[in-house]
Image (cartoon, rainbow, N blue to C red):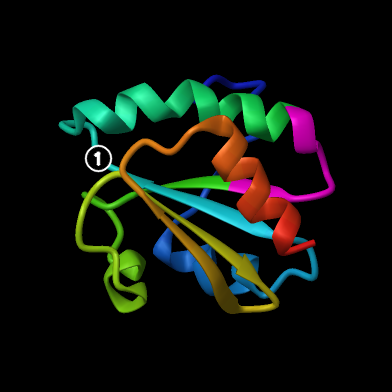
Amino acid sequence: MSENSLVLEITDANFDEIIQSDKPVLVDFWATWCGPCKMISPIVEDVAQEYGDTAIIGKMNVEQNTSGTKHGVAALPTLLVFRKGQKVATLAGVPSKKKIKKAIDKAM
Protein backbone atom coordinates (compact mmCIF):
# COMPACT_ATOMS: atom_id res chain seq x y z
CA MET A 1 0.00 0.00 0.00
CA SER A 2 1.36 3.37 -0.90
CA GLU A 3 1.66 6.11 1.70
CA ASN A 4 -1.06 8.25 0.11
CA SER A 5 -3.39 5.31 -0.32
CA LEU A 6 -7.02 5.59 0.72
CA VAL A 7 -6.88 1.91 1.67
CA LEU A 8 -6.73 1.46 5.45
CA GLU A 9 -4.45 -1.07 7.08
CA ILE A 10 -6.77 -3.16 9.21
CA THR A 11 -5.37 -5.22 12.08
CA ASP A 12 -6.80 -7.38 14.85
CA ALA A 13 -6.50 -4.30 17.10
CA ASN A 14 -8.79 -2.06 15.01
CA PHE A 15 -10.92 -4.60 13.08
CA ASP A 16 -13.98 -4.74 15.37
CA GLU A 17 -14.13 -0.95 15.70
CA ILE A 18 -13.82 -0.35 11.93
CA ILE A 19 -16.53 -2.83 10.88
CA GLN A 20 -19.03 -1.14 13.25
CA SER A 21 -19.11 1.89 10.92
CA ASP A 22 -22.38 3.22 9.50
CA LYS A 23 -20.59 3.30 6.15
CA PRO A 24 -20.03 0.09 4.16
CA VAL A 25 -16.65 -1.45 4.99
CA LEU A 26 -14.79 -3.60 2.45
CA VAL A 27 -12.00 -5.72 3.92
CA ASP A 28 -9.53 -7.41 1.57
CA PHE A 29 -7.93 -10.39 3.34
CA TRP A 30 -4.53 -11.09 1.76
CA ALA A 31 -1.04 -12.53 2.26
CA THR A 32 2.34 -11.65 0.77
CA TRP A 33 2.77 -15.10 -0.82
CA CYS A 34 -0.67 -14.98 -2.53
CA GLY A 35 -0.45 -14.30 -6.29
CA PRO A 36 -4.18 -13.58 -6.80
CA CYS A 37 -4.00 -11.16 -3.83
CA LYS A 38 -1.41 -9.15 -5.76
CA MET A 39 -3.71 -9.18 -8.80
CA ILE A 40 -6.66 -7.75 -6.88
CA SER A 41 -4.69 -5.11 -4.97
CA PRO A 42 -4.81 -2.43 -7.73
CA ILE A 43 -8.56 -3.03 -8.13
CA VAL A 44 -9.08 -2.47 -4.40
CA GLU A 45 -6.98 0.73 -4.64
CA ASP A 46 -9.16 1.95 -7.54
CA VAL A 47 -12.34 1.22 -5.59
CA ALA A 48 -10.96 3.16 -2.60
CA GLN A 49 -10.24 6.15 -4.88
CA GLU A 50 -13.76 6.05 -6.32
CA TYR A 51 -15.59 5.76 -3.00
CA GLY A 52 -13.45 8.25 -1.10
CA ASP A 53 -15.05 8.71 2.29
CA THR A 54 -18.47 7.25 1.41
CA ALA A 55 -17.15 3.76 2.21
CA ILE A 56 -14.22 2.36 4.16
CA ILE A 57 -11.84 0.21 2.14
CA GLY A 58 -9.17 -1.75 3.99
CA LYS A 59 -6.75 -4.62 3.76
CA MET A 60 -5.88 -7.18 6.41
CA ASN A 61 -2.70 -9.26 6.19
CA VAL A 62 -3.71 -12.73 7.42
CA GLU A 63 -0.10 -13.63 8.16
CA GLN A 64 -0.11 -11.04 10.96
CA ASN A 65 -3.79 -11.02 11.98
CA THR A 66 -6.41 -13.68 12.78
CA SER A 67 -9.72 -11.77 12.63
CA GLY A 68 -10.54 -13.23 9.23
CA THR A 69 -10.89 -16.76 10.58
CA LYS A 70 -13.80 -15.83 12.86
CA HIS A 71 -15.62 -14.51 9.78
CA GLY A 72 -15.09 -17.65 7.71
CA VAL A 73 -12.11 -16.56 5.62
CA ALA A 74 -10.62 -19.87 4.47
CA ALA A 75 -9.11 -18.98 1.08
CA LEU A 76 -7.27 -15.97 -0.29
CA PRO A 77 -8.03 -13.46 -1.50
CA THR A 78 -11.39 -13.02 0.20
CA LEU A 79 -13.20 -9.69 0.35
CA LEU A 80 -15.90 -9.16 2.97
CA VAL A 81 -18.33 -6.26 3.10
CA PHE A 82 -19.65 -5.18 6.51
CA ARG A 83 -22.32 -2.69 7.56
CA LYS A 84 -22.75 -1.78 11.24
CA GLY A 85 -20.76 -4.87 12.27
CA GLN A 86 -22.76 -7.31 10.14
CA LYS A 87 -21.19 -9.19 7.25
CA VAL A 88 -23.37 -8.43 4.23
CA ALA A 89 -21.30 -9.83 1.34
CA THR A 90 -18.48 -12.29 0.67
CA LEU A 91 -16.41 -12.15 -2.53
CA ALA A 92 -13.84 -14.91 -3.00
CA GLY A 93 -11.06 -15.10 -5.54
CA VAL A 94 -10.50 -12.18 -7.90
CA PRO A 95 -13.90 -10.57 -8.49
CA SER A 96 -14.30 -7.83 -11.07
CA LYS A 97 -14.27 -4.19 -10.03
CA LYS A 98 -17.93 -4.03 -11.07
CA LYS A 99 -18.81 -6.92 -8.75
CA ILE A 100 -16.93 -5.32 -5.83
CA LYS A 101 -18.68 -1.98 -6.36
CA LYS A 102 -22.06 -3.71 -6.59
CA ALA A 103 -21.47 -5.39 -3.20
CA ILE A 104 -20.49 -2.06 -1.61
CA ASP A 105 -23.43 -0.19 -3.21
CA LYS A 106 -25.83 -2.82 -1.90
CA ALA A 107 -24.54 -2.13 1.64
CA MET A 108 -25.04 1.66 1.38
Of all residues, the one furthest to the left in this rendering is: 33
Residue in the image at 28% along x and 66% along y: 66
Magenta stretch in the rendered image: 50-57
> Which quadrant would residue 32 be assigned to in this image?
top left
Residue in the image at 73% along x and 69% along y: 21
Residue in the image at 31% along x and 33% along y: 37
Query: With respect to residue 8, does 82 lie above or below?
Result: below
Query: With respect to residue 9, does 35 lie above or below?
Result: above
Q: Quadrant of the C terminus?
A: bottom right
* Residue 52 shown left or right of residue 42 in the figure: right
> Which quadrant would residue 94 be assigned to in this image?
top left
Residue 24 image position (x, y, % from top left): 71, 60
Residue in the image at 30% along x and 72% along y: 72
The residue that label 1 is drawn on is 31
Which of 96/86 is in front? 96
Q: Amino acid at mark 1?
A: Ala
* Residue 50 shown left or right of residue 32 in the figure: right
Residue 30 image position (x, y, % from top left): 31, 43
* Residue 40 shown left or right of residue 25 in the figure: left
Which of 93/71 is in front? 93
